[in-house]
Image: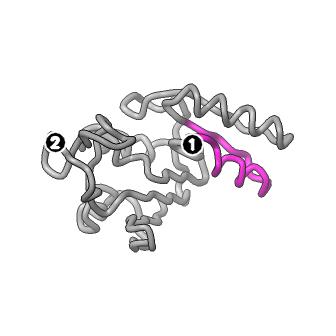
Amino acid sequence: MDFGSGSGRHVIYLAKAGFSVFGFDHSPKGIQFTREWLGQEGLCANLLLGDMAEKLPYSDNFFDGMIAVQVIHHARIAVIRHLIGEIWRILRRGGVLFVTVPVSKNPKLQYERIEPDTYIPLDGRERGLPHHYFTPKELYAEFSDFQIIGIHMDANRHYCLFGRK
């Protein structure tokens, strides 16, 4: 499962690798682009349009693995906690999880604080979209139901969490 599949780069990569792939995104344009790209490549994936604040439309214990690259931080912490619970629900026991979130705000942008550690950029391409900024300690706490295998910072200043249910 590619949660927040966007334009489909991970969906395509995983489908080419032979995985049974699911993509979930809030953008109709992203879903359409991914469908077209899959068609051009002769690949298949199950794509759904939806909202991460809602119950995810998958059965309990459905997925063996899930990635969420630069997605789950785009909400207030209550929605993020709901989503983490949904991820727990839809991953099978032993299922793996890979999540990335930004380390800090972009110093070139202006922000409005809407709750602790959550800001809305007032300019830039993600203007108006909430951004929650996690510390490693907070990532461990929020994903405490998971066995956290590791959290590291990549070269692009994103925290990368790898865990297992």
The residue singled out by tag 2 in the image is: 112
Q: Is residue 132 left or right of residue 15?
A: left
Q: Amino acid at mark 2?
A: Glu
Q: Which residues are magenta?
A: 7-24
Depth check, front residue: 96 or 117: 117
From the top left corner, tell me how far across and down residue 119 is, in percent.
21, 45
- Decide whether residue 32 is among the magenta residues: no
Dot 2: within a 10 Å radius of its alpha carbon, few (fewer than 14), some, or many (20 or more) residues?
A: few
Quadrant of the rendered image containing residue 82: top left
Residue 76 location (% of width, % of height)? 25, 40
Labels 2 & 1 near each other (Cβ < 8 A): no
Determine the residue positioned at 51% across, 42% down: 4
Q: Left or right: 6 with respect to 45?
A: left
The answer to which of 80 and 143 lies nearer the viewer is 80
The circle drawn on residue 156 is none
- Residue at the spot 38% in from the left edge and 57% down from the top edge: 101
SS at mark 2? strand
Label 1, residues with CA under 10 Å away: few <14, some 14-19, many ≥20: many
Front tag of 2 and 1: 2
Where, by quadrant of the figure, is residue 6 drawn? top right
Q: Is residue 150 above or below residue 50?
A: below
Of the image marks 2 and 1, the number of the one nearer the N terminus: 1
Q: In 3D space, how far apart are the residues under numbered discs 2 and 1 (Cα atoms)?
A: 27 Å
Q: Residue under label 1, please give it.
A: 5
Query: In the drawing, does residue 116 fall left or right of residue 140?
Result: left
